[in-house]
Image (tube, grey):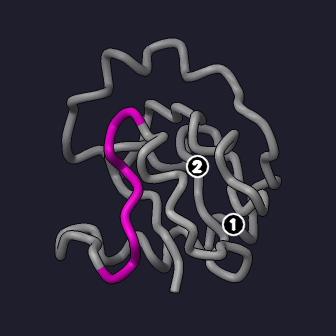
Amino acid sequence: MTHVVSEPCIRCRYTDCIDDCPVDCFHLGPSFVAIDPATCIDCGLCVAACPVGAIFHADLLPVSQKDFLELNAHFARLWPRASQREPKLPDADQWRDVTDKRRWIAD
């Protein structure tokens, strides 16, 4: 199984999770990070590292976030692999508690 980055990451893109990943399964997009399910070893280190609680084990994804399993796999094929923390987006703290952010996933 795999872990999945969900909607709270969108427009924040805190990348603390990337530093904790032992297999570099994260891919960096313009407003979101995605986990490659083929690379993730299901260690769970990224879950605690995420400051917005956006990462879940695939079996524990909230029902409203289930489509993020496929979205992570899709974007992991398109975006470059990330192996170290990047700066958060400039307005990340303003987006931290915003909901319904899907329309900004790949802007």
Residue 38, x across and y down, in percent: 70, 82
Q: Residue at x 55, y 68 (%)?
A: 72
Residue under label 1 = 76
| Number of numbered callouts drawn | 2
- Viewer-proximal residue, 9 or 53? 53
Q: Distance of mark 2 from mark 1, alpha carbons? A: 9 Å
Q: Establish if 72 lies above or below 79.
A: below
Amino acid marked by disc 2 = Val
Residue 104, x across and y down, in percent: 42, 43
Q: Residues within 10 Å of mark 1 (few under 14, many from 20)?
A: many
Q: Is residue 14 left or right of residue 103?
A: right
Mark found first going from the N terminus, 2 or 1: 2
Q: Establish if 81 lies above or below 53.
A: below
Q: Residue furthest bottom?
A: 1
Q: Establish if 77 lies above or below 13.
A: below
Q: Which mark is residue 13?
A: none
Q: Which mark is residue 33?
A: 2
- Determine if the magenta segment contains residue 23: no
Q: Residue at x 21, y 32 (%)?
A: 98
Image quadrant where residue 41 sits = bottom right
Judged from the image, the secondary structure of the residue bearing numbered disc 1 is helix
Q: Residue at x 42, y 42 (%)?
A: 10
- Viewer-proximal residue, 55 or 88? 55
Judged from the image, the secondary structure of the residue bearing numbered disc 2 is strand
Q: Residues within 10 Å of mark 2 (few under 14, many from 20)?
A: many
Residue 8, x across and y down, in percent: 32, 44
Q: Which residues are magenta?
A: 51-59
Residue 14, x across and y down, in percent: 52, 31
Say if mark 2 contacts mark 1, CB within 8 Å: no
Amino acid marked by disc 1 = Ala
Q: Which quadrant is the C terminus positioned in?
A: top right
